[in-house]
Amino acid sequence: MSVRTGDRVFDPVRRGLFPYLTRTPAVRRSASSVQVVILAAGMGTRLGRQEPKPLTRLNDGRSILQRQLDGLRTVLGADVSITAVVGYRSDLVMQAAPDLLFAYNPDFAVTNTSKSLLRGLRSTREGGVLWLNGDVVFDPAVLGQTLPQLAADQSFVCVDTNTVAEEEVKYTLDGDGYIRELSKAVRGGLGEAVGINYVSAADKATLVAHLDACSHEDYFERGIETAIAERGLRVRAVDISGYDAVEVDFEGDLARANTLLGGQAPNIVAEIA
């Protein structure tokens, strides 16, 4: 049961990445039925493109968005439910991926990701939700690392411990190994959040309430952080440092994404089932 992508070939059972995939069909279904929200409403002014940033072309010919969709469908299944939250030039995103569901943030020019995620979560059915920033380019094996938490319906934030840049969202842990702090202002951060996260069915209403209470300028991490501090939300840090994930804010990030991840389009040799 191997999958070949443009990044690497991985065997989930042999490499020990997804050992529970060999367990019961019910466990496999619980991971593959997750809902996905992609935050694609922003204007992406720092990258300096005319089109929405998720439509930025990579060296392999795909857009960032298409690469995300290919990875999600490779790991979670071709029929995974995906909603894109759109705003800036929404028609272009909708034309590029007409098979998705869509939620619209009409205030995209004056709000940050807390309000786009709020709209996205409110548009989903009951159950947990995996969400991605629309500008993160990642090896599909990153998603593989999250499958145990998805199957267990455990809220999490994907993190990279290889770097702790001052301008990125950083995190610390409490004594039980759960996220304690999560923001750009964190001091003594253990690593960076990479823009791939999950809220469980049980935690979703709490996160929605805290996102609703966020200011328009807040990133969604503020909603997570206040839910942790005020409601005891328990969020795991899933370490994906062994794989590549790049959030594209500037030209240098785009160059790095193309260097690390800009190979050929996925060639799936066997489905994960």
Image (cartoon, helix red, strand yellow):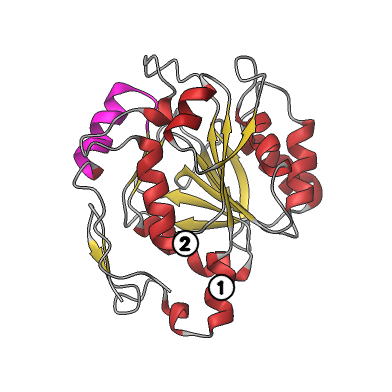
Q: Position of residue 59 (x, y in %)?
A: 20, 35
Hey, what amino acid is under mark 1? Answer: Arg
- Drawn side of residue 32 relative to residue 248, left or right: right
Which residue in the protein does label 1 denote? 29
Give the quadrant of residue 268. bottom left
Figure check: 269 above or below 267:
below
Asked if residue 89 shows in the view, the reply is yes
- Drawn side of residue 66 relative to residue 76, left or right: left
Label 2 – label 1 distance at C-alpha? 10 Å
**Which quadrant would the N terminus be assigned to in this image?**
bottom left
| Marked residue nearer the N-terminal end (2 or 1) | 1
Residue at the image position 19 percent from the left and 45 percent from the top: 263
Give the quadrant of residue 86. top right
Classified by dominant secondary structure, the portion drawn in magenta counts as helix
Question: Mark 2 falls on what kind of element?
Answer: helix
Which residue in the protein does label 2 denote? 76
Hey, what amino acid is under mark 2? Answer: Leu
Query: What span is in magenta?
Result: 248-260
Question: Mark 1 falls on what kind of element?
Answer: helix
Q: Position of residue 212 (x, y in %)?
A: 78, 33
- Drawn side of residue 9 relative to residue 148, left or right: left
Q: Nearer the viewer, residue 83 or 248?
A: 83
Give the quadrant of residue 52. top left
Residue at the image position 53 percent from the left and 24 percent from the top: 90
- Drawn side of residue 156 relative to residue 44, left or right: right
Residue at the image position 35 percent from the left and 69 percent from the top: 271
**Which quadrant would the C terminus be assigned to in this image?**
bottom left
Q: Position of residue 190 (x, y in %)?
A: 47, 48
Q: Confirm whether the magenta stretch covers residue 253.
A: yes
Asked if residue 149 shows in the view, the reply is no
Q: Confirm whether the magenta stretch covers residue 184.
A: no
